[in-house]
Image (cartoon, grey):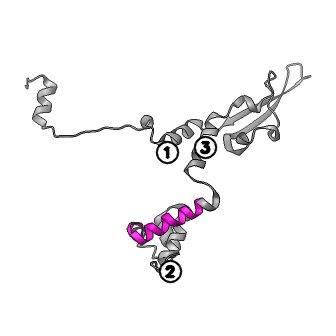
Amino acid sequence: MSGKLTPKQDAFVQEYLKDLNATQAAIRAGYSAKTAGQIGDENLKKPQIAAAIEKAKAERSERTKIDADWLLTRWADEAEADLADIYYPGTGQLRPIHEWPKIWRQGLVGGIKTRQERTSDDEALAEIVEVKLSDRSNRLKMIGDHIGVQAFKQQIEHSGSVSVESLIEELTGGTTK
């Protein structure tokens, strides 16, 4: 990786990229399990290791062609996917999966249940299909978090100082008991 890193530090960088867990990366890189949490935290703060991690992440992004733009585009496509696209128009019948748009085949559906029911006279057979969708609201939250939309965050800002006495006075309208 870099001439500045020891072999163990280089191994830490490579292991850290697997799951972004500093403690586990330290253990897998050969550091003591007893001190792995502390070592992992220290390693992340070392400028040469932090730079090596950022460089490796950038190289990985280049190789995979997955970056913030790709991710945001994907989330937007998923958030805007139309459920009607997986049904035949006007019939309410679910299309076979191979006819679904690609975005629906790539994780928007969390499960499909099919059951068959007979009518009361036991002659007709009806197939009932339930489609369980994955959590779209979470995708919207991730998009918002990524682009800095503050709609999903609770923020409390405070500047200056407040004395307990002035707060009590304000709350009681200047009268204390």
Residue topped by disc 2: 7
Amino acid found under the numbered disc labelled 1: His
Residue topped by disc 1: 146
Q: Is residue 23 above or below residue 168?
A: below
Q: Is residue 10 above or below residue 17?
A: below
Task: Looking at the image, tell me whether mark 1 or mark 2 is earlier in sequence order.
Answer: 2
The residue under the point 51% across, 66% down is: 55
Mark 3 residue crowding within 10 angstroms, few (<14) / some (14–19) / many (20+): few
Task: Looking at the image, tell me whether mark 2 or mark 3 is earlier in sequence order.
Answer: 2
Mark 1 residue crowding within 10 angstroms, few (<14) / some (14–19) / many (20+): few
* Residue 166 colored in magenta in the image: no
Residue 36 picture quarter: bottom left
Can residue 71 be seen at all in this image of the molecule? yes
Amino acid found under the numbered disc labelled 2: Pro
* Residue 54 colored in magenta in the image: yes
Mark 2 residue crowding within 10 angstroms, few (<14) / some (14–19) / many (20+): few
- Magenta residues? 36-61
Q: Which mark is residue 73?
A: 3
Q: CA distance from mark 1 to mark 3?
A: 12 Å
The percent position of residue 47, horizontal first and vertical second, equals: 39, 69
Q: Is residue 111 left or right of residue 144?
A: right
Can residue 24 be seen at all in this image of the molecule? no
User: Decide: marks 1, 2 in contact (CB < 8 A)?
Assistant: no
The percent position of residue 104, horizontal first and vertical second, equals: 71, 39
The residue under the point 63% across, 56% down is: 65
